[in-house]
Structures are given as structure tokens and as C-alpha cells.
Amino acid sequence: MIIYDTAIIGAGINGCSCAYFLSKANQNVVIIDQEAIASGGSGAAGAFISPKFTKGGRLKELLEEAYLFSLDFYSTNFPTYIQKAKLLQIANSDENEVRLNAFKETTTLSFSEDSSEAEPILTPYAKESASLVLEEGGVVNAKAMCEALAEGIDFSKEKVKSLHYDDGVWQIGDISAKCIILATGSYDLVVEMPYLELRRVWGHRIDVKTTTKVPYSIHHHLSISPSSEDGTLAIGATHNLHYNPFGDEKYDVEDGRKELLEKALKSVKLENVEVLKDYVGLRSGSNDYLPIIGRVVDADKTMDETFKPSKLKKMSDDSFTHFPELYMINGTGGYGFVLAPYLAKQLTEYITDKTELDTELTPTRFFRRWAKRIG
């Protein structure tokens, strides 16, 4: 019987990125998913590689680092599946303009305000708004990239409902593994984590054909990719915070498509538009907007009769009881394709080489807040 080094539950961009880096570290890896590679939110993502255009904070810093890393990673290792182009960011409100101007003052990235190459196709409304141009940006072929990352790695189609750990090995149905990474996105976390609630965001993207040549990645009320050689481009993705695919209400694809086109036409004068395909899916973000990577705290075993919430500040992360060899990567939200390779490499090095992780990003931060609240 094969005992894998690591089983990854979830075949989106987070799971596939972890599989890639662990495989490069000579681990024997299996990916488990209830459907297929990139069948959920990752497959419906706009998959634009860009930083966060705001004035400061940990997320902005993290996304600048991840943007540079992932742009280089995709371009070097999978050039077939990324289309590189300049990135034009246009403010879509007065508040957004303040953030964009603050970004210009604080960013370490080089930029210009020369959008002349795109101006012939911009609407008057878009031209009036504050903007900047990054020399490098890109859009990834979402599904193809996930499949390329997972190429040559074992895959099992299975809905994981429970895990069992015994004698140093995790059992997931018929699969055995020494280590597990939960990359489940918006779906069931599989193990009990009462301290962790994720934000579920429904997304919709369309691929269209148009006679308008778009030279840049354009981000305004939504994102528009540069035109491919055959005149196709991607528009998306809208973020619907209220739709729940697990409920009784059915998502109206035609209404979603209409909204995407209306928002795109606020920015760019697209002509002779033909919608080729719709992509929909659910993505997940954290309540503090930072991603989540690292070991998973076992709340029940940590909060025994000796646990004192008043001592939380003085307690190190290592003083909590964690599930053995159980890790997670989640909460990347609309920046999944920017953050995933960057975070997956760090998580791989943490698992294989015991390097340090940023404590601001570990699941333990949520346990601390929860334990303090209920204690």
C-alpha cells in the first residue's frame, strides 16, 4: 500500500501550487478533490496578476511581494499559460482615487501615468479618472495553469467527509498520507475549527470575442484582459457577496453576464462583442482579509481544564495543541493566482525544512481571538 508524503485536499490554485512545490521537493503527493482540477472558484477566476492598489498595510506589502514573485514564477515556468501586458489601474470612485494616489506615494513598484497606448479605446468617463500604469502585469489561463502545476501528480476524485489519524498516518478513505494540506477554499474545512469562519464570495467571469484591440490589462470597475491574437479577452470577475450556491436560489447567469458587460463598457469601447463562455464559482477570503497558511490548532485539546485565556498574550503558538501534520492554505480571495505560488513555496519550506512562517498569516491568529472571546 502506498503511503503518500502529503495528501492535498482541494484542487484549486492553492492546492495545485502546493502540489507543484512539494513535488519539486521530492515528495510523493496526491491531490484529492470532489470534482476535478480547478472545477470551483479557481476555474472561474479572472486570474489577473496585480498588486493591491491602496496606501499601506500588511496586505498591500504582501501582495506586492507576491505579485513580483508570481509574475516571475509563471513567466519562467509556464510561459504558455500567462499573457503578459502592461497593467492600467483606473480609480472607480473618489475614495478609490485617494487610495490610488496613496499607493503612488508608498509603493516600491515602478509605474508611470502614460496610458496613451490605451486611450483610443477608453471611454471619456475612464479618461477623466485618476490612473497609473505598471510596466508588467499579466493574466493567467486559470484552468490550464492549475492543470500544468498538477501535471504528473496523482489525483483522486473523492468528496472527503472525515479524516482519521493513527500511528503517524492520516487515512482519507483508501488513501494514506503522513501529512495533509487542506486547500478546500469555500468548501467544508473537514476538521473542527470553531475559531475559523471564511467569507464566501461568488464570482462570474466571461470570455468574449471583440473587434476592439485591448493592449493592456485594464482594472476599473472590473478587470479586462489584453486581447489575444484571435481577438478574445476575459472580463471579470464580479463579486457577489450575497449569493449562496448551497441554498435554494439559482444563480441567473444571463443577469451576471449583463452586469459584466455593462461594467466593462463603462471603461472600454468594446465593439462587436460576442460572449463565448461563462465561468462561475465560489472563492473564499478571511475575515481580516489576510491569507491563511500553517498548522491547524486542535481547539478541543488546547482548551482543556488547564487552559487560561488570560495567559494568551504570553503563550507562543507552539504552546497550543495542533492536529499532527495537518496544515492549511486558504483565504486568498480574489488574489488567489497572485498569492498561491508565493504562499505555497513558503508552506512547502515550512513542512520540509522547518523554516519559519509569518505568524500574522497562520490559523493560530484566529484561535487566539476566538479563545479570548469565549474565555
Image (cartoon, helix red, strand yellow):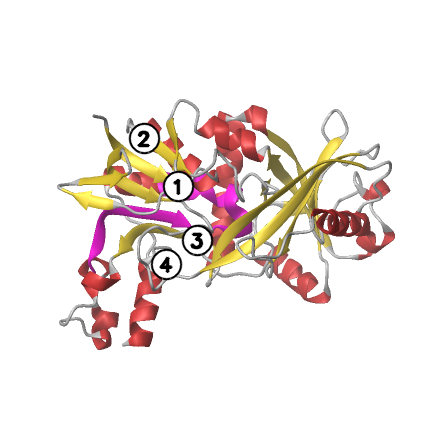
Residue ranking furthest to the front: 248
- Distance CA(mark 4)–CA(mark 1): 31 Å
Q: Say which residue appears at 77% left-offset and 49% top-offset.
A: 258
* N-terminal label among 4 and 1: 1
Q: Which residue is mark 2?
A: 29
Q: Which residue is mark 4?
A: 360
* N-terminal label among 3 and 2: 2
Range drawn in magenta: 320-346
Which element is circle 4 on?
A: loop
Which element is circle 2 on?
A: strand
* N-terminal label among 4 and 2: 2
Tell me, yes or no, if residue 108 can be seen here.
no
Tell me, yes or no, if residue 371 can be seen here.
yes
Q: Say which residue appears at 82% left-offset and 46% top-offset.
A: 122
Name the quadrant of the N terminus.
Answer: top left
* N-terminal label among 4 and 3: 3
Q: Which residue is mark 3?
A: 291
Residue 77 screen position, x and y as percent: 48, 26
Residue 3 position (above or below residue 241): above
- Residue 303 falls in which quadrant of the image? bottom left
- Distance CA(mark 4)–CA(mark 2): 28 Å
Which element is circle 3 on?
A: loop
Which element is circle 1 on?
A: loop
Residue 112 screen position, x and y as percent: 69, 46
Q: Which residue is mark 1?
A: 159
- Residue 155 falls in which quadrant of the image? top left
Asked whether, in this view, residue 167 is left or right of residue 109, the answer is left
Q: Amino acid at mark 4?
A: Glu
Which of labels 4 and 3 is toward the front? 3
Residue 270 position (above or below residue 148): below
